[in-house]
Image (cartoon, grey):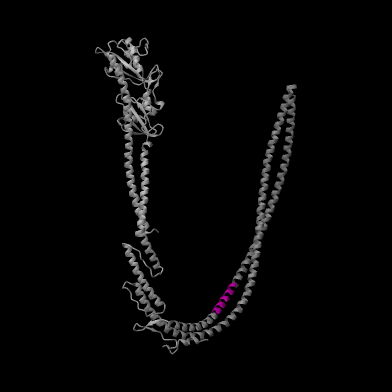
Amino acid sequence: MKSVSSRLLIIMLAITIVGMGLIAVIGNVLASTALIEQSLGRISEATAFNSESINSWLVKQIGYVDAIAADFSSRDDVSPEELVPVLSEYTEADEICFSVYAGFPDDSAVFNDEWVPDEGWKATQRDWYKAAIATPGKANLTDLYVDAQTGSFCLTFVKTFTHKGAVSGVVAIDVLTDELGKMVNSIEVGDNSYAFMTASDGSIMAHPNKNYEPVMDYDEETVFQNIAGIEGGHYAALRNSDILGGESAKLKSADGVMRYYTAHIIPLSGWVLYTAIPVSVVNAPMYHQIWVAAIVFVIVLVAAVILIYYSLRRLIMKPVKDVTEAANLLASGETGIHLDGNYVGEIALLADSFKGMEAFNRQQAEWLESIATGDLAIEVNPRGKSDRIGHAIVSMLNELNSMFANIHTTTQHVAEGSKQIAGGAQSLAQGSTEQAASIEQLSNSIEQIAEKTRLNASKAERAAKLADTIKESAEKGSLQMDEMIKAVREINAASQSISKVIKVIDDIAFQTNILALNAAVEAARAGQHGKGFAVVAEEVRNLAAKSAEAARETGQMIQDSMSKAELGNRIAGDTAESLAEIASGINESNQLVAEIAVASEEQSYGTEQINTGINQVAQVVQQNSATAQESAAASEEMSSQADSLQKLILQFRLKDGDGRGKRLPSAGHTADNGGFSAAGTGDYGK
């Protein structure tokens, strides 16, 4: 059973735990949400920063092509012979540019390495030329493609240049994207993160997974894989406008890892830079905060438990324990209990109540001690009408005074009557003794008759048991004979089965003999070449003849066994019938012996009933005799006990009619019962 303090402690702990738990959960949820949003914000900022770096790289290349176009536009002579050395200088001036060239409206072109195009090659039909002409006076760049000479991915930055106010050609620089790929692959926004880049239509331009990079088809055309189509459309959600607008999206990657994907559009080219980071990395600060919060929660909870426990112990548990111990001592009858603690509140009121109850219990103990010593004249003053114990003690004193006065008078009358009872008891005891002797003689005679009857019944019972044993043996022999008959029949059946098998063996020997004869005939036809086969055929025929002979002899022996088994079966049947007749005779004999045993048992039972009746009469007579003797002795003892009782009563101090204490008259005074004194009653029969 739990104490009140334990219940209070549990309730307060439950309230504390629930309250602190709710605060911790709500705080962790809010803080975790803020941490995740903060982490995703940093990731978005890092993605934007890296996209700006790529955009700056593009701006640099565009600035370079702007400078070349401005140079060409400022020249008076832009003939191929004049431009080749200039193109070579620009190529060597920039490590990224591996080719600088110019195309003209007449479909001619000039290259820094003096490469001569094939016949039919036309500059105005090239994509880079068309892109520049589409935006005259503004630098532009082509889509990513594979360079035919180097086999590497590259970009072409183009811009028109003018002469005398009219477009006179297009300048172009080819830039390998190896550095751009390195920039994308080097981007990290956190642990285990990576970045990849797509064109504005979703075509993958750079990705750490080589399986997603552009490839060449059979026509030597560059084929890009679209982010929305790879892995069966697994990443199609990355093309949503929300993600392209800068929001981070949580998506399970093809490798089964949940990741946050953040996108940022590169302004100059419209390309999209994506960063991917595992959700576990983003949530790591949240988990760390949860652990810290859990540790703080446990520390605060332990401190609260300790504070609550010691407060309850000082204010409730210790005072309640003191009062409980005092109550247990009071319940066990202890007096003189002291509650001296510095109690407060309701505990102090409870302690004062216990002190008052202990003082009254001590007063009651003093009254009861006086009553125990024989002083029935003490004054008992109850505390009020509701003091049941005080009123009960007053009633007990009054009843004891009245009872002991009546007992004193009654003992005098008892002493006189005990003398008369003793005389009659002595006469009754003498007559009962003589009657008991006569009954005892009769009981001995009946006992001898009963003993002989029991002996006859015992012998009849033994005869019945012996007959049962013989009957059981006969029945057992009959059963065993039945089993033997069954076994003989089974042997006969087995012999018939073996006879069938022998018949099959005989047939096999016959067929083998025929085969051997056929083999001998064939050997004879074969002449000199069949001699060996003829010898074998002869041996097989001899073996077949021996097998047939053995089968006939075995069959004859089995037939003899079957005849003998049949004879044994008939003999066993006759024996079984004889055993059955013996068992039937034994059964009739057993019934006769059983009837004799039952009759002897009934006769023994009747004799025992007569003997039991006589014994009961003898016991009654003996009990009467003993009772008479005990009555005489009891009468004498009663006279002596009456004297002793009167002496004991004289020890009590009773109230008189005025409520004052008085002693009862001594044993030598004469009572009002005819002049007999209490002292004289004890002399009778001594």
* Residue nearest the viewer, comparing 518 with 45: 45
Chain part drawn in magenta: 608-623
Task: Decide whether the magenta segment is chiefly helix, strand or loop.
Answer: helix
Per the image, is 182 magenta?
A: no
User: Is the residue 110 above or below the residue 613 in the image?
Assistant: above
Residue drawn at the location 36% of the way across and 46% of the way down: 296
Q: In this view, does 506 lie to the left or right of 656?
A: right
Q: In this view, does 535 lie to the left or right of 335?
A: right
Residue drawn at the location 62% of the way across and 77% of the way down: 444
User: Is the residue 526 above or below the residue 652 in the image?
Assistant: above
* Residue nearest the viewer, comparing 24 with 214: 24
The N terminus lies in which quarter of the figure?
bottom left
Residue 263 visible in the picture: no
Residue 611 visible in the picture: yes
What percent of the width, then of the height, locates residue 643? Answer: 47, 84
Per the image, is 609 magenta?
A: yes
Residue drawn at the location 40% of the way across and 66% of the way down: 328
What percent of the width, then of the height, locates residue 250? Answer: 35, 34
Q: In this view, does 660 lie to the left or right of 163?
A: right
What percent of the width, then of the height, locates residue 113? Answer: 37, 13
> Where on the picture, by quarter, is residue 675?
bottom left
Q: Is residue 517 left or right of residue 257?
A: right
What percent of the width, then of the height, locates residue 575? Answer: 69, 53
